Amino acid sequence: MKSKKFKAMVATVAATLFLAACGEGAASNNNVSQGVTDDYILVGTTFVTSGAWAFIGSPIVDNFISVINRVNAHGGIGGRRIELLHYDDGGDPAQGHILIETLLEEREVFALMGISGGSAPISLGYMHDFGVPIINITGGVAFMYEEYAPDSNLFLIQPSNAIDGPTLLARVLGTATFGPNLDELLADDAPIGVMVNATDAGDDIVRGMTQLAQEIGVLDRLIIETVTADIYPTIIQSFMSAGVGALVNGTVDSMGVIAAMSDAGWYIPIFSVYGASTIASYSPYTYDPRRPQFATIWAEDTSPQALAMLADMRDALNYHTGLDDATRDHYVDNGFARAGYMTAIVLVEGLQRLQDSGMDFTWDNFRVAMESAPFNVGGAPEFSFANGRRMGVEDMALWQYSAIPLADGGFDIYHRIVSGFMSIDEILEPWRNR
């Protein structure tokens, strides 16, 4: 028997699915159904779980395993167990593409989940043409997102970087975190420094941010620099000389950027991308209350719904026998781990919807199931794939990190949501009314 908690996370309304299946535009039962037998549903993922970037991939994949193991322990999907094939791509997009081909053409998986964003530029066209359902590609690269793509096999969850960019600018302008008491809006004449990497994500952030800046008349206040870690000190000195009043960190290296700010004695608020909305991205040794540290976030962790989600995540982690309790507890506070959990939950709910509908396990029918109703995963805004929408989460909250030294030499780490999920227009309202 499934627990009530688990049922709540994968619940669906079967009647909605039957209406969708029988109505105009419903999928046929004649297309691809590879990777499904009477006993199992085969799904695959490629992600880096070794080397320098394993701190991103390992938490994600471990949570895939945890959620799937729990599903199987409670009877699977209609008696079918989910089997996960994971290949470590080493962070190499070319190797990732080869492994995706292996999963689709040799292992014949039914669906892919959590594919690394590094593989997207060279693999997305191939995966789209193949037709396999893909549950989330990490990285938020904007070219993957579409307002209306009725035949799309891609089901993104996390926000686009092209949304994160203007959201960051809106937060800098519309959030009262400046002045002597950190309760004022940024001064109207203060320049805004922006640091990004020379990547697709960096380009998306800049494009979205500059578009909004032009619309609201602040483009001349942006100072945008493409950076690598070795030039952080130089860029920071130039920002200080220019009188920059707020820093937008468009890289995921918030720890390195803040360390360089600390070395320079620079105390202004820093706003980082949503990929840095986790305590794993910060060091207590460089924290200073004179330098408030924020990040956009698409899955908050303070509301009752979010706390229930985190409790369910911790329960799922008990089903991963390769983890100790300390790692399980750490993952609950890890943003990458949470993304892995949420991706797996959405996959499971989609499969359960398809099972409950009575339709055959085909790719077209899976799409019908995914589009049949919005998804509500605790801690994140509702998102929907209905009518071909492929935008993932579109509103974000604002997250803050702080660390208080303790007498024993340790730190009391705090992280909180300082502003809930809001649209860009809602965030900018205080600035427009100033």
Image (cartoon, rainbow, N blue to C red):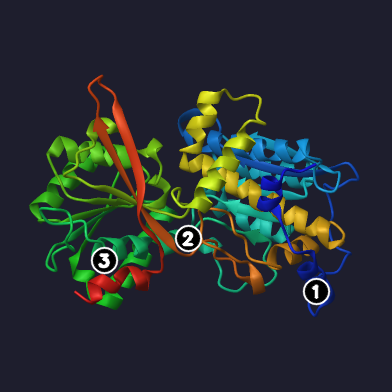
Point out the image quarter for the N terminus: top right
Q: Nearer the viewer, residue 238 or 424?
A: 424
The tag on residue 187 is none
State the CA–CA distance, disc 2 to disc 1. Answer: 31 Å
Instruction: Assign a secondary structure to mark 3.
Output: helix
Q: Nearer the viewer, residue 325 or 372?
A: 325
The tag on residue 174 is 3
Is residue 249 left or right of 145 when viewed as pictured? left
Q: Nearer the viewer, residue 343 or 264?
A: 343
Q: Which is more foreground, mark 3 or mark 2?
A: 3
| Residue at the disc numbered 2 | 160
Q: Residues within 10 Å of mark 2 (few under 14, many from 20)?
A: many
Q: Is residue 289 visible?
A: yes
Q: Residue at left 56%, top 32%?
A: 49
Point out the image quarter for the C terminus: bottom left
The tag on residue 19 is 1
Is residue 24 left or right of 329 when viewed as pictured? right
State the CA–CA distance, disc 3 to disc 2. Answer: 21 Å
Instruction: Assign a secondary structure to mark 2.
Output: loop
Which is nearer the N-term, disc 2 or disc 1? 1
Q: Residues within 10 Å of mark 3 (few under 14, many from 20)?
A: many
Q: Amino acid at mark 1?
A: Leu
Q: How many numbered callouts?
A: 3
Q: Amino acid at mark 3?
A: Gly
Which is nearer the N-term, disc 3 or disc 2? 2
Which is nearer the N-term, disc 1 or disc 3? 1
Q: Is the C-beta separation of discs 1 and 3 under 8 Å?
A: no
55 over 361 or under it: above or below: above
Pinpoint residue 431: horizontal percent, then vertical percent.
23, 71
